């Protein structure tokens, strides 16, 4: 019996009739240094001080919505000082990814984090995702972001794409501007080195599982999240993942937003996570730039 659908399926399977497979332009991985350095797992606490930038990247009209702006301003006003106190209490280093516009609106955030010995790294300028920008716009965003932090007397070496959404062109720009690492991709749970343009970058992979936004992000307008989970759930997720990571020799990049985890009960959960990690002698904390240096140093 002749069946039109079956005939077309057989025809599609004939040699020379297969559709073209499009390949992702992955950068080539290169030799990686001994980043574990005797540990079973490494933790990097990364703090994305977005403040108002992700909301205004959606629509600048929210600049006049004081309720929405106050929700975001809680981060630099209250969350950052609390986080800095917590980090100082346990002598734990962190990396602060700060958009250029946040740095200009809240210069004390940059100054206080840098004065405390933490790393300050790039997180775009307006918090617009590179995937939504032209090549020219991407370059302009990176230039403005870099110039802003350099204006504070800093020499940033790392980058995180807003929303973790980048293109291959983004990686090539990072190399062109002399940066040493990125922390935006999710294709591993261990760091790796990759060839981009004429340079080698370290990649410090991230994941939604280790992001507080996925647990606490809630705002009616604009819709940047519709959930408020208990801090105990976040703590269980993070400690369970870190426990398993010790068995596999992984990098745990925890992503924190001050307007979310700066709230008291959530800050307490982060403190419990830090205490949990410090109880294990085979777990160590590092700044992102310090780990990137190990990744890029090899025999």
Image: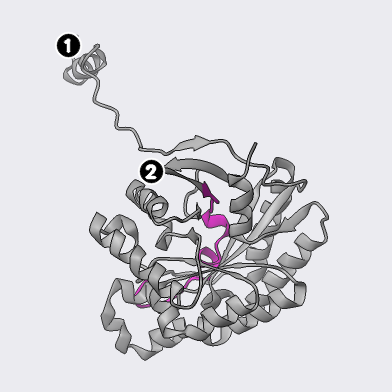
Q: Judge by depth and name the residue closer to the eye, 115 or 14.
A: 115
Question: What residue do we see at 40% from left, 43% from top?
Answer: 198
**Residue that mark 2 sits on:** 197
Q: How far, Cα to Cα, is label 1 from label 2? A: 54 Å
Label 1 vs 2, first from the N-terminus = 1
Looking at the rendering, in which quadrant would you find the N terminus?
top left
Q: Are marks 1 and 2 in contact (CB under 8 Å)?
A: no
* 299 left or right, relative to 91: left
Which residue is painted at 59% across and 74% down in the image? 261
User: In the rendering, at what x and y percent does residue 212 appear?
Assistant: 56, 66
* x and y percentages locating residue 31 in the rendered image: 57, 36
Residue 189 seen in the figure = no
Nearer to us in this view, 219 or 186: 186
The 10 Å Cα crowd at callout 1, few under 14, some 14 to 19, many 20 or more, is few
Q: Which residues are magenta?
A: 202-223
Residue 92 falls in image quadrant:
bottom right
- Residue 148 on the magenta segment: no
Whole-percent x, y for residue 159 in the image: 47, 60
**What number is the disc on residue 2?**
1
Q: Is residue 14 above or below residue 225?
A: above
Left or right, residue 190 beside residue 53: right
Query: Marks 1 and 2: which is nearer the front?
Result: 2
Residue in front for this viewpoint, 128 or 148: 148
Name the residue nearer the viewer: 228 or 53: 53
Q: Which residue is at 25% across, 11% downward? A: 15
Residue 200 circle label: none
Decide: is 105 above or below 192: below
Residue 182 horizontal/vertical position (percent): 48, 54
């Amino acid at each position: 019996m002749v069946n039109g659908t079956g005939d077309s399926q057989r025809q599609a399977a004939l040699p020379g009739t297969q559709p073209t497979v499009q390949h992702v332009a992955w950068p080539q991985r290169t030799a990686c240094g001994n980043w574990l350095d005797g540990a079973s797992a490494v933790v990097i606490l990364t703090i994305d001080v977005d403040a108002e930038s992700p909301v205004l990247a959606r629509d600048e009209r929210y600049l006049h919505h004081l309720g929405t702006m106050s929700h975001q301003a809680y981060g630099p006003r209250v969350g950052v000082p609390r986080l800095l106190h917590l980090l100082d209490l346990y002598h734990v280093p962190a990396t602060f990814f700060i958009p250029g516009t946040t740095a200009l609106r809240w210069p004390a955030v940059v100054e206080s984090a840098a004065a405390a010995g933490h790393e300050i790294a790039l997180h775009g300028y307006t918090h617009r995702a590179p995937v939504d920008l032209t090549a020219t716009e991407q370059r302009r965003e990176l230039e403005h972001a870099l110039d802003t932090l350099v204006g504070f007397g800093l020499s940033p070496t790392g980058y995180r794409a807003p929303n973790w959404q980048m293109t291959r062109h983004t990686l090539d720009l990072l190399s062109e501007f002399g940066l040493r690492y990125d922390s935006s991709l999710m294709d591993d749970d261990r760091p790796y080195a990759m060839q981009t343009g004429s340079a080698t970058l370290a990649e410090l992979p991230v994941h939604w599982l280790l992001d507080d936004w996925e647990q606490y992000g809630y705002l009616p307008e604009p819709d940047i999240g519709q959930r408020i989970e208990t801090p105990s759930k976040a703590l269980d997720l993070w400690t369970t993942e870190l426990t398993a990571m010790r068995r596999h020799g992984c990098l745990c990049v925890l992503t924190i937003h001050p307007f979310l985890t700066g709230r008291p009960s959530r800050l307490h959960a982060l403190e419990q996570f830090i205490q949990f990690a410090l109880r294990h002698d085979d777990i160590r904390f590092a700044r992102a730039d310090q780990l990137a240096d190990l990744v890029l140093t090899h025999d």
